[in-house]
Amino acid sequence: MVLAVTGEVGAGKSTAAKLLAAALGAPLIDADAIVASLWKTGAMADLASGRWGVGVLNDDGTVRHAEVAARIFTDKAEYAWLMSVIHPLVMGEIDRRAEEAGALCVAEIPLLFESGRRRGNMRAVFVMAPRCVRLARCTERGWDEEELTRREGFFLPARERAAMSDYVIDNGGSLDALNEAVRKISLDFSGSEC
């Protein structure tokens, strides 16, 4: 069984996923970490340079992430192409790690619904927060409001993803409020038939 944590950009998915994993005593799988490791492979560098030219590579042959982001977050066709390459690899690795983990794991999967893949043994937690809170968090990443809006344009609307989820966390308040929401989900989840 996988408890998949997804949500809005800057809503606090990572924090919620870590808290859920700790509350459930379950291993945590991070889809973004899997993506980062994929980008370090020669195969991904070859795919990127084959698609966009050697300008997306550093002198040492590694991928220049800012160059790739500039291409995919300005062109929906390029974004769709890259996701068609990456999603199967990431979900395959999540499947492998979940199977290895045994009975239960928590997986942070930002693009759970966009990947078109939600398995039968997976329950989804959607983390949301008011836009002003998310913008403040994204500003810490160096993104302005325009960048947040641009990136959000590549995802399914939040209300659709929330409706497809088993649990919704409003993470616009305090850490104590988030801990309480996580506690309720962990009690429900651990007490349910998995």
Image (cartoon, rainbow, N blue to C red):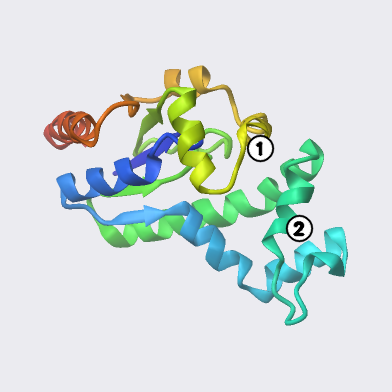
Looking at the image, tell me whether mark 1 or mark 2 is earlier in sequence order.
2
The quadrant where residue 143 appears: top right
- Name which residue type carries label 1: Glu
Q: Residue at x 16, y 30 (%)?
A: 180
The part of the image, by quadrant, that contains residue 2 is top left
* Residue position for label 1: 147
Asked if residue 83 lies left or right of residue 67, the reply is left
Q: Residues within 10 Å of mark 2 (few under 14, many from 20)?
A: few
Residue 168 lies, in percent from the top left, at 34, 24
**Which residue in the structure is indicated by mark 2?**
67
The secondary structure type at the circle numbered 1 is helix
Quadrant where the N terminus lies?
Answer: top left
Q: Nearer the viewer, residue 46 or 12?
A: 12
Using the numbered discs, state the Cα–Cα distance from disc 1 to disc 2 in whole angstroms.
15 Å
Residue 124 place in picture, x, y as percent: 37, 33
Pick the residue in front: 147 or 36: 147
